[in-house]
Image (cartoon, rainbow, N blue to C red):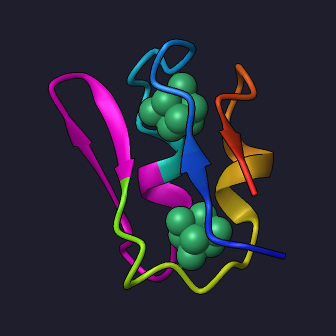
Amino acid sequence: MAKATVDADNCVGCAACESTCDASAISIEDGKAVVDQEKCIECGACVSACPVEAISQ
Ligand code: SF4
Ligand code: SF4
């Protein structure tokens, strides 16, 4: 596993990933998800939660 990364071109800003992240590593900024690489514990929950496959690890 690795830190989560967001493809901003695909992200629709739904915030499903933000509410799924137990580490509070994701915030929505200007309508796009942003992952705090320092906080991400590489759990993969956000990757599964994203409806448009905009997050990968
Ligand atoms: S991989 Fe886990 S800890 Fe990292 S941003 Fe996604 S949900 Fe949060
Ligand atoms: S779940 Fe996917 S589309 Fe929704 S805010 Fe997160 S990265 Fe963007």
Q: Left or right? Give the position of 14 relative to 20.
A: left
Number of marks drawn? 0
- Residue 33 in picture, x, y percent from top left: 38, 39
- Residue 34 in picture, x, y percent from top left: 34, 48
Q: Residue at x 44, y 56 (%)?
A: 19
Front residue of 20 and 9: 9
Quadrant occupied by the N terminus: bottom right
Say above or below: 48 vs 41: above
Front residue of 26 and 2: 2
Q: Left or right? Give the position of 4 relative to 13.
A: right
Please check the rendered image and state whether residue 27 is part of the magenta-colored stretch, yes or no.
yes
- The span shown in magenta is 18-34
Q: Residue at x 45, y 24 (%)?
A: 8
- Residue 9 in picture, x, y percent from top left: 49, 13
- Residue 35 in picture, x, y percent from top left: 40, 58
Q: Residue at x 75, y 28 (%)?
A: 53
Quadrant occupied by the C terminus: bottom right
Say which quarter of the image contains residue 31: top left
Please check the rendered image and state whether residue 51 is part of the magenta-colored stretch, yes or no.
no
Q: Residue at x 70, y 19 (%)?
A: 52
Q: Left or right? Give the position of 39 relative to 49.
A: left
